[in-house]
Image (cartoon, rainbow, N blue to C red):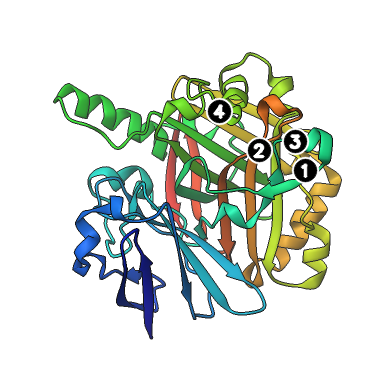
Amino acid sequence: IPIVYSYTTKDHINHTTLCCHKTNKLLTAAHSLQTATNPSLFNNTIDIPIDYSFAMKSQRVSHNSSLDALKDLVYADDKSILTVSLSSSTLSDAVGDGAEGDDAISNEPPSCEFCCTFDANSHRVRGKNYSRDKKKVEAGPSLFRYFAADVVEVDEYVREGFCNLPNERVQLALKREQEMHSKGLPSDMPPYIVAVNIIMPGPPKYHLVFYYAVDDMSIIDGTDETPSSKLANQFFFGDSDAFREKTFKLIPRIAKGNRLVKKAVGTTPVIIGKKIATTFVRSDRFCEIICDVTSSTVAKKVCSLVNSYAKSLVVEMGYLLEGDDSTVLPERIFGCIRLNHIDITQLRRITMKEEGDNSTSLR
């Protein structure tokens, strides 16, 4: 099925034709564009309508590619239209199948094929003067870079955090970083990782873990002097878990699916720590936010309903930190995730062999 992409540059418009495989990966003809070698020609955001009826699956991100990332997909439930946004930071290597070079952290172990990101700007968040006028504004692009998802069945819930498991992607990346640095080479490990780990009720027992890279520490350590960086500095590096619990916010949305499920899930932003048990596993290189759905009877019932319809659903979630005054507003979404028709009978499985070790298998 041919798809025409219209690339809007500062100087002119280029057109190229791409096609969509049954595997839901894009074949990009971007390198044939004259502007491909000069990403600075592109505006910050380029919207590309795709007349196609299904949501795309995970996209692999490569730091060293020459164009911008194919990173955001917005599913329009009624119109069967997808909008792809390209930003001027990284390019999705949608053609490659292997985990090589700087893609290793995304593909070792393989990222869940049911998951991808989407355009954060499709959400509305608290504006600069929200405490006074209660007005919300478009969220803008995500602050962090999504790079992988683990949807993993377990024999026992991993409450100490996936980022601490020796055979999972973060610890493997840290090990590679040491090896590469010993050779004077760069690694695929970003400066900082934020992971959102959702413990889902069984059967089967499973985790949803979404990983976001912070490629520029100034956006979370307060040094870029933005309100969002100020708030992030307190959240990620402060001492108070109580502050983190009252600040971490989720915006849910069922983009496609059963009306009963849509009504049960809703679209109202929620402070997760007020609804379910939330813990934080932190180091100098990562922060993992663990949200335990099994701690709440109401949340368990809603998620069990979602599980029963999972194959027919497109679920979207945006994560952000709540701002309560003008010094930390407007709010910014740090990451988004879309779950596309997930099949919980086809999950990667982790078995804890002994304390401090784990093995994985595919069912």
Observer-nearest of 312 and 262: 262
Name the residue beneath numbered marker 1.
Answer: 270
Name the residue beneath numbered marker 4.
Answer: 226
Mark 1: which secondary structure? strand
Marks 4 and 3 sit apart, C-alpha to C-alpha, by 15 Å
User: Between disc 2 and disc 1, whose residue precedes?
Assistant: 1
* Residue furthest out toward the right: 298
- Residue at 75 percent of width and 35 percent of height: 129
Q: Position of residue 309 (x, y in %)?
A: 70, 68
Q: Position of residue 236 (x, y in %)?
A: 57, 24
- Residue at 69 percent of width and 51 percent of height: 124
Q: Position of residue 254 (x, y in %)?
A: 70, 63
Name the residue beneath numbered marker 2.
Answer: 331
User: Between disc 2 and disc 4, whose residue precedes?
Assistant: 4
User: Between disc 2 and disc 3, whose residue precedes?
Assistant: 3
Marks 2 and 4 sit apart, C-alpha to C-alpha, by 11 Å
At label 4, the amino acid type is: Thr
Marks 1 and 4 sit apart, C-alpha to C-alpha, by 24 Å
User: Between disc 4 and disc 3, whose residue precedes?
Assistant: 3
